[in-house]
Image (cartoon, grey):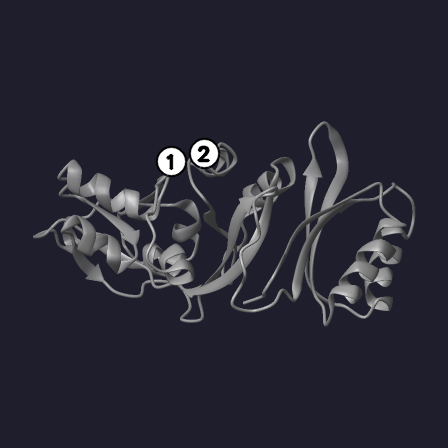
């Protein structure tokens, strides 16, 4: 749904796991990928930050999608029949209140929201439902038992459009005004403060900071920041200032913020 909303009429190629999505982009079997990076209820998708750092891709765009989760089952199945609900763990975490009210029903993680509906229908499971968008029910001929079961109506997911780092840049509808950057710091007092102060002094607007552990180096972290900028020169100055305090700094993308 996010890919179609962002790009219009395209062929959508499904993958089982996120690492396969990155492989498809890198080997050229797809032109681009659309992946979630953050949900307003669940928080960041940590795995995707790790994959952005370790793969030669760049962020070329961003979008927001209002997320409406629905309880979906095979035709004829009722709420009273249910013993199990499948969905992606992130989707399940966005529906804790509703699922907690289903007595005697266990929630189980699945690789994908729409894939959970496909599985329920393919196996004709009559005691199982899935949490997924209504489009999945329409696609697989399932029935919506309950609409909008997310914990809060203000439920949005932010998606990134990814291409290979060496791919030609297409002319965007809106000019870039946002940067995603990854960096590491020396283990010294005040290094993070100095790095962030460099961004503030450069006049950019820091919109997010995220940390992820460095594999093999306990208690060391990679920091990810996103900031908005008024001009390309301001972005360049901010990154140059930040690099003075960093052991590693990798620009992952410049794009139009949602």
Vertical relation: 175 (above or below) 187: below
Can you give x and y, in whole percent of width and height, for residue 55 in the image? 60, 36
Rendered image quadrant of residue 137: bottom left
Whether residue 98 sits left or right of residue 118 in the image: it is right
Can you give x and y, in whole percent of width and height, for residue 128 in the image? 21, 44
Res 126 label: none
Res 16 label: 1
Question: Crowdedness of circle 2 by 10 Å Cα count: few (<14), some, many (20+)?
Answer: few
Vertical relation: 147 (above or below) 91: below
Q: Which residue does the image show at 13% across and 54% down from the upper left?
A: 78
Q: Give the CA distance from mark 1 to mark 2.
A: 7 Å
Can you give x and y, in whole percent of width and height, for residue 63 in the image? 49, 63
Between residues 80 and 124, which one lies in front from this camera angle? 124
Question: Crowdedness of circle 1 by 10 Å Cα count: few (<14), some, many (20+)?
Answer: few
Count of picture labels: 2
Vertical relation: 166 (above or below) 197: above
Rendered image quadrant of residue 257: bottom right
Q: Is residue 85 something one can see in this rendering?
A: no
**Tag 1–tag 2 contact (CB < 8 Å):** yes
Element at label 1: loop
Whether residue 117 sits left or right of residue 152 in the image: it is left
Element at label 2: helix
Q: Of the residues tagged 1 and 2, which is closer to the observer?
A: 2
Q: Looking at the figure, which quarter contains the C terminus?
A: bottom right
Q: Looking at the figure, which quarter contains the N terminus?
A: bottom left
Q: Which residue is mark 2?
A: 20
Q: Which residue does the image show at 31% across and 66% down from the upper left?
A: 148
Between residues 72 and 1, which one lies in front from this camera angle? 1
Q: Is residue 51 something one can see in this rendering?
A: yes
Whether residue 100 sits left or right of residue 103 in the image: it is right
């Amino acid at each position: 749904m996010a890919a179609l909303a962002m790009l219009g009429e395209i062929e959508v190629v499904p993958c089982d796991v996120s690492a396969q999505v990155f492989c498809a982009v890198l080997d050229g079997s797809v032109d681009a990928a659309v992946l979630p990076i953050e949900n307003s209820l669940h928080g960041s998708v940590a795995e995707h930050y790790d994959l952005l750092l370790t793969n030669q891709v760049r962020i070329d765009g961003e979008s927001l999608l209002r997320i409406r989760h629905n309880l979906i089952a095979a035709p004829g199945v009722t709420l009273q029949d249910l013993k199990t609900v499948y969905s992606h763990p992130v989707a399940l975490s966005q529906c804790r209140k509703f699922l907690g009210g289903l007595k005697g029903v266990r929630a189980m993680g699945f690789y994908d929201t729409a894939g959970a509906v496909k599985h329920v229908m393919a196996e004709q499971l009559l005691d199982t439902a899935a949490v997924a968008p209504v489009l999945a029910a329409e696609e697989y001929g399932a029935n919506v038992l309950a609409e909008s079961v997310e914990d809060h109506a203000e439920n949005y997911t932010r998606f990134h459009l990814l291409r290979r780092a060496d791919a030609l840049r297409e002319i965007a509808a809106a000019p870039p005004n946002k940067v995603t950057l990854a960096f590491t710091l020396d283990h010294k007092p005040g290094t993070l403060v100095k790095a962030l102060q460099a961004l503030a002094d450069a006049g950019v607007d820091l919109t997010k900071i995220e940390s992820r552990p460095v594999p093999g180096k306990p208690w060391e972290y990679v920091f990810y920041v996103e900031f908005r900028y008024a001009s390309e020169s301001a972005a360049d100055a901010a990154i140059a200032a930040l690099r003075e305090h960093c052991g590693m700094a990798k620009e992952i993308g410049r794009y139009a913020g949602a």
